[in-house]
Amino acid sequence: MGERKVRAVYMRGGTSRALMFRRDDLPPADSADDYAAWRDIFLGAIGSPDPNGRQLNGIGGGISSLSKVAVIGAPTHPEADVDYTFGQVGVFRPTVGYRGNCGNISSAVGPFAVDEGIVAAGGDHAAVRIHNTNTGKIIIAEFALEDGRAVVEGAYELQGVAGTGAPIRLTFRDPGGASTGRLLPTGSANDRLPIAGRTALPVSMVDAANPVCFLAAQSLGLTGREAPDTLAADADIMKTLRDIRVAAAVAMTLAPDERHVREVLTNLPLVALVAPPDPAAHPDEAGVDIIVRMVSSDQPHKASPLTGALCVAAAAHVPGSVVADAMGPPHAGDLVIRHPSGRLEVAAEMATVDGEEKLVSVTAIRTARRIMEGDVYY
């Protein structure tokens, strides 16, 4: 059979890029059980699997943040304007993961939906209610309009992305338990995670926007300031981080056993190394609340997955968590995270419900840009 093609739009969302598809352009798929109909399209278009890790035969870039797809269609949720399904395409393996969402790519969904005419918008401002089918959660994307299209140019600087762009405000409503149904999947703010060949590690497993396993960088003999390439080059550390992800996935009930995590659930949970800021020794950490190094799909992230950063904001409000213990002095305003490419500001809104603190929403600012549109071959 010769090459086939399908219409797609290539977009940057935050510090990631993805192929964006209209659901009507893809084969029918009624549920996650039916997404197999999309698998060959996504793998062929992105260029996976690639044992060389470069995805030269497709449009991917060889790292998790450039190996993504999104499917946009009419809403199936009564409170939404549009449905959005995220897929994390494996680089080395022929996998497409639908468990969990990508916050960065979420920022591209609203502009895509408006520019494609899926969502009608007028005036100079849009507030698109997005139903993320992966998590069942609602995300509100607010952004400026001009002549009925999303504004791209602006003065907002997103660290990790060259230049500036128009801000997109993302609010993730009721983000707790996005993948597991509970903010604290194990019921505890602190756990000791057994890892082969090591003393059980103190971790906090939190599920807000996406599930994340947090641990202090010093527990692995690290500072938390290591460059992603430095981490990636350390085979022992990378094996330990993979083992942590596998063990945490089972502990968080994301998978029935370790084999399933290694072979199927290759993207969750995220693993985050955290450390307290030290402005005296590192002047660029002045005004920073926490240092974070994220590992996504077993690869050190060049910046930070947005959902991971939002989970940091949620975990900061959990007393006794690894994140709360690593935080700098409390202050008014958003939480400031230092990642390898700069800073990221996020916020969590809490409310007292029946005498208990409840996570109402988490918020961040991103930018997005349409890069290319046309047919992609697979």
Image (spheres, grey):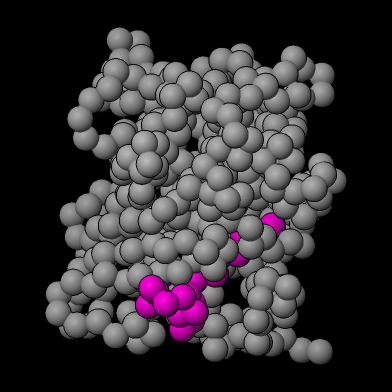
At x 31%, y 26%, the residue is: 288
Percent of width and height locating residue 89: 65, 61
Q: Please identify the residue farthest to the front as the structure is shown.
A: 354
Q: Which residue appears farthest toward the left when viewing the image?
A: 123
The answer to whether residue 90 is above or below residue 147 is above
Identify the residue at image location x=74%, y=35%.
Answer: 247
Q: Quadrant of residue 150?
A: bottom left
> Is residue 80 inside the magenta stretch?
yes
Q: Position of residue 44 (x, y in %)?
A: 70, 73
Pick whichever, 373 or 249, lies toward us.
249
At 54% across and 21% down in the image, what residue appears?
216
Instruction: Identify which residue, 270 or 173, lies in the foreground.
Output: 173
Towards the viewer: 375 or 134:
134
Q: Is residue 6 visible?
A: yes
Please provide the residue range marked out in magenta. 72-90
Q: Is residue 200 left or right of residue 208?
A: right
